[in-house]
Image (cartoon, rainbow, N blue to C red):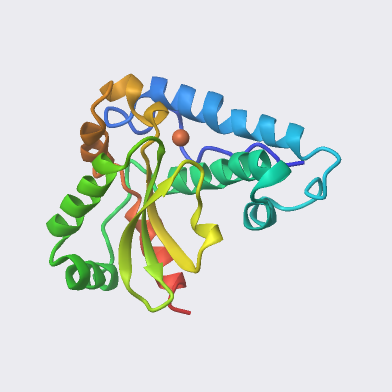
C-alpha cells in the first residue's frame, strides 16, 4: 500500500508561473490518481508490500507493466514537485561550473533543454542527469520511464505531458518551459548534484 505523496508547497504557491488550477488537476487528479491505480493493481501481487522505489526498479513488462507505469509516474511526479519552488535560490558554484563546462553557459543549457523538451514526441519527461562517468546530460524519457531504471543520478526534471501545461498554455509547450525557469528549486537540484559525487 503506497501512501499519498504530499505536495511540498501550497497549490497557489507557484502563481503566476504555474496556476493553482493546473496544480489542482496535476497533483490532485493525475498524481493522486496514479496512487489510487497503483494500490489497485498491486493487490495480491508480489509488489503488495514493496516500497515505491522497489516497484519502479523491479516492475516492467507483462502483467507488471501497469504496475511500473503507475509507480514510476508517482515517483517522477514527487521528484518534479521537489524541483519546483517560488523561492528556489540559485545554482551552486559547483553546479554552475559543471553546466558551463557541458553547455558553455546557463543560457546554453536552457536553450538545449528547451529544444529537447519541445521536440519530445508524445508524452514524457525531460531530465538533467549526471552519468556514472560524471557527465551532465539532458535526456528525453518517454511516457513513465524513470531514471531509477538507469545508472544515472537525476538532478532536475520537467514534466512535458500535456496535462502539465494545457490549462495554462494550451498547446504551447515552449511557454511551459519558459515559465519553469522562474520556479526551479535550485537548492534541491544543488543537493542532488552534491549527492551524485559520493
Ligand atoms: Fe504529470
What is the residue that sits farthest to the front in this orientation? 62
Q: Is residue 3 above or below residue 164?
A: below
In the rendering, at what x and y percent does residue 184 appear?
A: 31, 47
Instruction: Identify which residue is drawn at 43% across, 75% down.
Output: 132
Q: Nearer the viewer, residue 21 or 86?
A: 21
| Residue ID at (42%, 64%) | 191
Above-or-below relation of 128 to 74: below
Q: Position of residue 100 (x, y in %)?
A: 17, 69
- Residue positioned 16% across, 51% down in the render: 111
Q: Quadrant of residue 99?
A: bottom left
Q: Between residues 36 and 125, which one lies in front from this camera angle?
A: 125
Give the quadrant of the N terminus.
top right
Quick one: 43 or 80, which is closer to the camera?
Answer: 43
Q: Position of residue 53 (x, y in %)?
A: 64, 55
Q: Position of residue 173 (x, y in %)?
A: 26, 32
Q: Residue furthest right?
A: 44
Q: Is residue 140 above or below residue 27?
A: below
Q: Residue at x 81, y 45 (%)?
A: 48
Q: Is residue 64 left or right of residue 127?
A: right
Report the label total. Answer: 0
Asked whether, in this view, residue 107 is left or right of residue 102, the answer is left
Amino acid at each position: 500500500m503506497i501512501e499519498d505523496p504530499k505536495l511540498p508547497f501550497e497549490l497557489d504557491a507557484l502563481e503566476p508561473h504555474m496556476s493553482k488550477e493546473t496544480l489542482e488537476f496535476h497533483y490532485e487528479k493525475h498524481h493522486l490518481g496514479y496512487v489510487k491505480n497503483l494500490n489497485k493493481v498491486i493487490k495480491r501481487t508480489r509488489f503488495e508490500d514493496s516500497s515505491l522505489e522497489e516497484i519502479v526498479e523491479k516492475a516492467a513488462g507483462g502483467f507488471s507493466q501497469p504496475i511500473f507505469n503507475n509507480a514510476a509516474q508517482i515517483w517522477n511526479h514527487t521528484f518534479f514537485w521537489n524541483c519546483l519552488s517560488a523561492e528556489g535560490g540559485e545554482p551552486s558554484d559547483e553546479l554552475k561550473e559543471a553546466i558551463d563546462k557541458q553547455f558553455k553557459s546557463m543560457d546554453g543549457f536552457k536553450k538545449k533543454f528547451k529544444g529537447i523538451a519541445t521536440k519530445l514526441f508524445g508524452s514524457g519527461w525531460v531530465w538533467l542527469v549526471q552519468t556514472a562517468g560524471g557527465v551532465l546530460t539532458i535526456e528525453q524519457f518517454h511516457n513513465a520511464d524513470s531514471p531509477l531504471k538507469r545508472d544515472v543520478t537525476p538532478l532536475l526534471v520537467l514534466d512535458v505531458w500535456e496535462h502539465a501545461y494545457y490549462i495554462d498554455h494550451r498547446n504551447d509547450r515552449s511557454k511551459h518551459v519558459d515559465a519553469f525557469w522562474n520556479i526551479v528549486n535550485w537548492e534541491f537540484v544543488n543537493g542532488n548534484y552534491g549527492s551524485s559525487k559520493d
